[in-house]
Each structure stands twice: as structure tokens, then as C-alpha cells.
């Protein structure tokens, strides 16, 4: 028989799994947007120094992707540890 504490923990883990999935989805959407945006900026003519805007766009998008993806993975690892 499960106690109320166990049920509460399972509900919290389910909520955290959902949150982790949302963070992972946002991470992949940011990555896709970064790739599309960088490609667009690279292939639109702007003159001398046209590389700086795509470079900053890619770096910023990549850092946001890493943060969101790492946060999702950390939540997953914490859920796995708490299951033991």
C-alpha cells in the first residue's frame, strides 16, 4: 500500500517530467529557429561586414539552446536519482 507521501512524490515527478519535456521542446525550437535565421542572414546580401550579424545570431541561439537542453537533462537526471 502506498502512502500519501509516495503519491505526492509521483505527482511531482510527473509534473517535472512534463516540465523537462517542455524545456527540451523549446530548446529544439530555438535550435531550429537559429539555424533558419542564421541561414537567412548569411544568404541575404548586406555588403562588407555581413558576417557579424549571422555570427552573433548563431552564438546567441546556440547558448540559449545549450541552457534549455542542459536544464531539461538536469531535471531528468534528478528524477532518475529520486527513483532509486
Image (cartoon, rainbow, N blue to C red):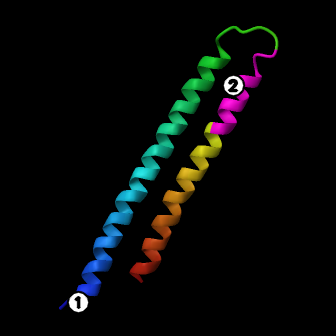
Q: Distance between the residues labelled 2 and 1?
A: 55 Å
Q: In this view, does 7 lie to the left or right of 39?
A: left
Q: At x 61% / y 38%, what residue is drawn?
A: 61
**Image check: 32 left or right of 40?**
left
Q: Which residue lies furthest to the left in this view?
A: 1
- What range is drawn magenta here? 49-60
Q: How many labels does the image show?
A: 2
Describe the element under mark 2 as helix, strand or loop: helix
- Secondary element type, mark 1: loop
Residue under label 1: 3
User: Taking 44 as reference, is 31 above or below it?
Assistant: below
* Circle nearer the N terminus (2, 1): 1
The residue pinned by badge 2 equals 54
In the image, residue 59 lies at what x, y percent?
Answer: 69, 37
Quarter containing the N terminus: bottom left
Name the main secondary structure of what is drawn in magenta: helix
Q: Which residue is drawn at 38% across and 65% down?
A: 16
Q: Does the magenta stretch include residue 58?
A: yes
Indicate the position of residue 31 as horizontal and vertical percent values.
Answer: 54, 38
Using the image, tell me which numbered label, if any, was put on residue 47.
none
In the image, is residue 78 above or below residue 70? below
Q: Residue at x 49, y 58 (%)?
A: 72
Of 56 and 36, nearer the camera is: 56
Q: Quadrant of the C terminus?
A: bottom left
Q: Do the residues labelled 2 and 1 touch (CB within 8 Å)?
A: no
- Is 29 colored magenta in this rendering? no
Q: Which residue is found at the position 60% from the left and 49% from the top?
A: 66
Amino acid at each position: 500500500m502506498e502512502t500519501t507521501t509516495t503519491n505526492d512524490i509521483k505527482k511531482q515527478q510527473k509534473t517535472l517530467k512534463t516540465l523537462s519535456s517542455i524545456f527540451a521542446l523549446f530548446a529544439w525550437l530555438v535550435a531550429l529557429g537559429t539555424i533558419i535565421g542564421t541561414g537567412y542572414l548569411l544568404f541575404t546580401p548586406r555588403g562588407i561586414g555581413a558576417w557579424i550579424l549571422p555570427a552573433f545570431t548563431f552564438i546567441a541561439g546556440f547558448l540559449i539552446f545549450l541552457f534549455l537542453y542542459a536544464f531539461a537533462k538536469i531535471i531528468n537526471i534528478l528524477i532518475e536519482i529520486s527513483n532509486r
